[in-house]
Amino acid sequence: MDSGRILLALQERDKWRDRRTRLEDRLHTVQARKRFLQRKLDAVRRKVARLEEVAAGLKDGRVPWEHAYGTHDHVRR
């Protein structure tokens, strides 16, 4: 093999290593963002479930008391 072909092969190897490193970094960034958004989505789902419970209780005549709805329901008489 001549030195030009060896040099080209080494440059190609380095180029692909750099690309792989950048792709792995990007993948880690995307995965971290996904975890963050999943936590936010879970929090929103919990909030929606709580608000649905409060709305259903209000339809049934219950009143939420001190932000502890479901634990200390009060019935209107």
Image (tube, rainbow, N blue to C red):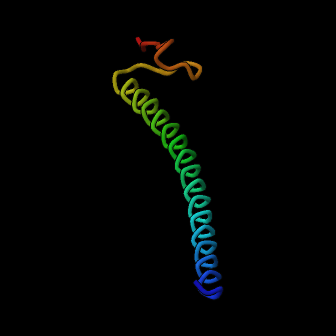
Residue drawn at the location 64% of the way across and 72% of the way down: 14
Residue drawn at the location 63% of the way across and 88% of the way down: 4
Instruction: Tell me residue 46's x, y (percent).
Output: 47, 33
Residue drawn at the location 47% of the way across and 21% of the way down: 63
- Relative horizontal placement of residue 22, taking residue 48 as reference (left or right): right
Residue sticking out furthest to the front: 1
**Residue 16 quadrant:** bottom right
Viewer-proximal residue among 48 and 63? 48
Instruction: Tell me residue 23's x, y (percent).
Output: 56, 64
Instruction: Tell me residue 29's x, y (percent).
Output: 60, 56
Q: Quadrant of the N terminus?
A: bottom right
- Relative horizontal placement of residue 56, taking residue 5 as reference (left or right): left
Q: Quadrant of the C terminus?
A: top left
Q: Where 52 falls versus 77 (above or below)?
A: below
Instruction: Tell me residue 56's x, y (percent).
Output: 36, 27
Q: Where 60 falls versus 47 (above or below)?
A: above
- Relative horizontal placement of residue 75, taking residue 13 as reference (left or right): left
Viewer-proximal residue among 13 and 18? 13
Viewer-proximal residue among 32 and 38? 32
**Residue 5 quadrant:** bottom right
Q: How many marks?
A: 0
Viewer-proximal residue among 36 and 50? 36
